[in-house]
Image (cartoon, rainbow, N blue to C red):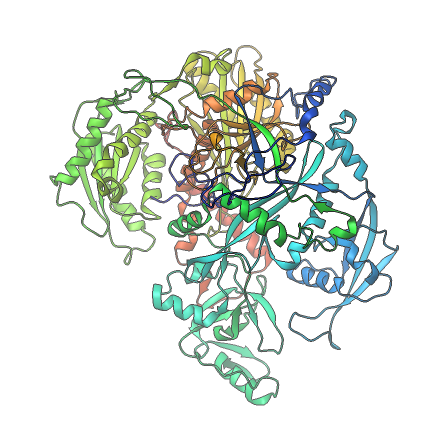
Amino acid sequence: MSNPSRGRGGNRGGPPGGARGGGGGFRGGRSSPSMRGGYGGGPRGGGPGELIFRGPTSVDQRLATLDQLVSSFKKLAFNPNRPHRPGYGTLGRQITLRANFFPIKLPKGPIYDYHVEITPSTDIKRIRARLFWLLERSNQQGWREFVTSIAHDNSERLVSSKKLPQPLDVQVQYYEEGEAGPNAKSKTYTFAITHTGNLDVAQLTKYLSGNIEARDSDVQPLIAAVNLILQTHASRTGVRVGKNRYFFPSQERFELALGVEAWKGFFTSARPVYKELMVNVGVCMTAFYKPGNLADAIIEFNRTSNGAMLQRFTQKLKVTTSHLGYKKKKPIKKIMSTTARQTTFHCEEYNGKITVEEYFKRIANSSAEYPHIKLKHANDVPVVDISGPNSNFPIFVPAELCEIEPGQPFRGRLNEKETSNMIRFACNPPRVNADAIVDRGLPTLGFTPQTLGSPMSSFGMAVDNNMAVIPARELPPPRLSYKAGKPPNVSSGSWNILDVKFHLGGTIKSWWVLVIKDGQTVFNGPNDPNLEGIWKGFGEKCRNSGMSLGSSPSLINQELIPPSRDPSRQQALDLIRQNIKRQISQKGKPTFILVILSRRDNYIYPGIKRICDVELGVHTLHMLTDKVLRDRNKQDQYFSNVALKLNTKLGGINHMLDAESMKWWTKAKTMVVGMDVTHPGPGSVEGTPSIAAVVASADSSFVQFPASLRCQETKKEMITDLTAMMIERLMFYNQKNRSLPDRVFVYRDGVSEGQFNTVLEEELPKMLDAFKRVPQTKPYRPSLTIIICGKRHHAKFWPTESQFADRNGNTRPGTVVDRGVTAVFDFDFYLQAHAGLQGHVKATHYTVVYDENHLGADEVQQGTHTASYLYARATKAVSLVPAAYYADLACERGRCYLNDFLSADDKVSSSVATGKGKGKGKVDKEEEKKSVFEAAKKAWGEGVHPDLRGSMFYI
């Protein structure tokens, strides 16, 4: 079963399809007891087997006045928009943690801020970056004496510790990397550097100290300036990927796939916390192309994989050519299907049509500059087109004249095995990560006294090399109940369900078992003991768990055309569709279909989900023969997990929390909403829509969360059709409860900190509009709270004592942090509800951005924590509150409906072409994106079938 990585950043939390426990994503300490307080510095010692990084220590003294801080907030008038922190949580056991935050010594004077304009203008990032590199090496009088005092973003912004002369124009002659210097033909660019203002460090200090008058100060320009200064060393010595992640050739790496390797790097970003500006430093990983000759790489691909991965490999790959006498970096537009001997083009210089091989022979013979060009692979390796993306004419170059330069991030999509390898490599215990950050990260980033250089030293800045030490708490778990059987004992965030019955069992009137034979033969006919063992064992598990199951299933077989004859699997899916339709016409719709797949496939699983969810309106469950037959001792547990899903799909209730744990939700009629948007990732056709999901609880048990799904503008994070989706959820709640909720709590997933205000500006009005427009006899207006859930942060925590650590050295389930490294004014906290099964566990960062319910810190923290035990398809607490998790799952299901657009790189890719036709201009590309979007909307149709819309079909 395929679970494609999401556009916003791949598999999150645990493994695909599993509970969000465990993994912690692609983030990756030895230990040493500390002998002093403060930030946990001091001599390091202890054996290599110790789990605790630097041992016991005391909380930073700066935090002693936190209670006075929240007391001062009481003078502020209450405002539901971006509410101030109402207080700090008190519930739970007090513990002390280290966090990967390091104090920054700030400049004393102002930071001078400048706007940079380059003439003639260029929007090509590579050329702009090269121009700034040349600017730093300019000897122009009135500029060169300031070079060590500046930092810039390679684009439009420059900051300086010294006031630069005005007006300031610096001229730079452009030449490529590898050329000795400028020549007579070199283009001259002018940098106009204009002063825009002074950034006042004193104002930031007021903000950090919690001065109420400074609350509305815009400190982001100054923090962004500090980030420019902090990251200058890393940007000069490493490779930046994304906004704040840097990778260095000297750090660890390992082979991930053919031509691709994983690099370990470091994340760095300045964060405002109480009384300090701190730099958050974390371990991160990403995939890079392996350097080498392009022809050699193509030959290796053809030898080991029949060229199958070649198109995916070359997505957004840049190659360097040197045959012109200097290095020139160009992106590959296409790998052609023809060799240098077979490929022709029109050449004025040689009077008409000529082959690429003949052209390079002639220039080698006729010019003293190019005698080194001798093609070895003119007839066995294709040529590549390195013309620009908007060029109308190709530029063909033999692959053997192209080098894959080191330090190029791989922009394609990793497959399931590669993702698994990446996670395995990244999953280090907490202590290994702590050592990597302190021993390698800080020096590599230029943050240690020995590596500190310009421009940090010229600004008078420095970074304390000891981690922040902060107070935290361990919250108690809730009590759980089932209909029958002993109440489960919760240990380390999980429990088992042997001999218990679901609170409310679903009713199964009829069911089918659809056996998909795809290649290998697993079962010898319908009476095969292994096949009987699966459906009988699963049926028995459902019955014993409290589900109503009378009849035996109907067995249906379907043999598929092999992928070699049906690469897009459309014929195979048509066979499945016709077979199910035929059976429905004969027997009527079953309650559900159990689909048994003989192997994983990127088309069959999502294809069946689309056929049954969208076209036919039938619930489906999938089992992989490899999983269900691999270990008979684990088969009962496997059936239990699938039964949890089935009962939830059918409207059942698996387990519940005790009344005390539920009281913050049940003290008034409350609807809990989860929202998420997923975007097309690498390998998608350009123009493919994003998918938005809104799920909402339907009753007072907070177990059933039916969903509204929409496809919308590509890569748009805010939900376009939110008003209609919210009305659907409110009407369903009304239908089930014969009244509308008095309170609505929204958990919004997938929004970055920079978009918090956008949620209030764009999504909040749509929610309020939905309240007005929901059909009702009198005006309706529930009280609303919006909480943002953030998983894409880099805050990590380390226990300071082994008694508060799990067996891997992680913090334990229920750990909550709301002091020391949280926002100064905002109402936020980090909560780790789940157990860290592998690697370094990661908390979720919750921020209350809108609150009409006047919620308190303990209420939100413990309420969100206990809710994390209500996730229906697992017997463990999960890392993300279930409402948001369900929205994420619903988005993933929506991806199945657009699989042909999202998995384009698995088909015949546009990056491998025949070379016919001209290039496309920007206008053509926009038109093409529009037509893709319209085709995807047509494929989406009306979305989920009406028969499934009231259920958790997506779980």
- Taking the view exactly as shown, the residue that stands out farthest to the right is 166
Q: How many marks?
A: 0
Q: Position of residue 899 (x, y in %)?
A: 40, 45
Q: Residue at x 16, y 35 (%)?
A: 533
In terms of depth relative to the viewer, which is nearer, 877 or 65? 65
Q: Residue at x 35, y 48 (%)?
A: 602
- When the figure is inspected, residue 393 is found, relative to residue 921, above or below; the finding is below
Is 443 left, or right, of 882 in this rendering? right
Q: Quadrant of the C terminus?
A: top left
Is 943 left, or right, of 619 in this rendering? right
Q: Position of residue 777 (x, y in %)?
A: 53, 10
In terms of depth relative to the viewer, which is nearer, 818 or 601? 818
- When the figure is inspected, residue 399 is found, relative to residue 276, above or below; the finding is below
Q: Quadrant of the N terminus?
A: top left
In terms of depth relative to the viewer, which is nearer, 132 or 491? 491
Is 844 left, or right, of 269 in this rendering? left
In terms of depth relative to the viewer, which is nearer, 373 or 560? 373
Q: Residue at x 27, y 32 (%)?
A: 637
Q: Position of residue 179 (x, y in %)?
A: 67, 74
Q: Using the rendered image of the protein, determine whether residue 880 is visible from the camera's viewpoint.
A: no
In which image quadrant can residue 212 be found? top right
Q: Using the rendered image of the protein, determine whether residue 530 is visible from the camera's viewpoint.
A: yes
Q: Position of residue 618 (x, y in %)?
A: 30, 32
In which image quadrant can residue 492 be found? top left
